[in-house]
Amino acid sequence: RELVQSLVKYYDASYKIPAGTKLGDFTIPGHLLLNEDDLAASSLVTDIINLGKEFNDKVCQEKTSQSTVSENVTTSDVNASASDVNASASDVKSNGDVNDNAAKIHENQAVAAER
């Protein structure tokens, strides 16, 4: 008895309330459920299958879009970092050129002072 009560509680907590929004409504004629041949030949089965396929396609498309966005963000972050590194390398080269030029000017001034 305790086992059954705990299973009922578990069922009520886990399955009684739908987890998401409903995908659609179907009106099922009473005779359809009682006649297997009519059920198999009805459009109801095809409609339910198509609804599931459409939902699955939508979920797959959303996941693909999200992963593409993540890849684009990662790629742009890497490109931005590479640009920063290139800019820093240019700054170092420019500073090196400036230092070389300053040293040459200083040498020229020293040579001029000796004359």
Image (tube, rainbow, N blue to C red):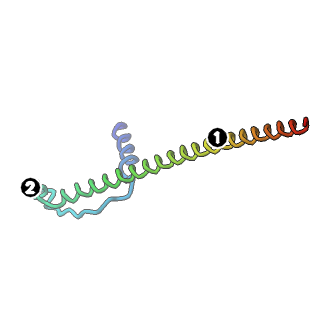
- Secondary structure state at the residue bearing disc 2: helix
Q: Position of residue 86 (x, y in %)?
A: 61, 43
- Sequence-wise, the earlier of marks 2 and 1 is 2
The quarter holding residue 53 reads: bottom left
The quarter holding residue 52 reads: bottom left
Q: Nearer the viewer, residue 48 or 110?
A: 110
Q: CA distance from mark 2 to mark 1?
A: 77 Å
Crowd class of label 2 (few under 14; some 14 to 19; many from 20; radius 10 Å): few
Crowd class of label 1 (few under 14; some 14 to 19; many from 20; radius 10 Å): few
Q: Position of residue 93 (x, y in %)?
A: 67, 40
Q: Look at mark 2 in the image and give the residue it sits on.
A: 37
Residue at 61%, 41% in the rendered image: 85
Tag shown at residue 62: none
Residue at 10%, 56% in the rendered image: 35
Q: Look at mark 1 in the image and give the residue it sits on.
A: 89
The quarter holding residue 58 reads: bottom left
38 left or right, relative to 82: left
Q: Quadrant of the C terminus?
A: top right
Q: Position of residue 112 (x, y in %)?
A: 88, 39
53 left or right, relative to 40: right
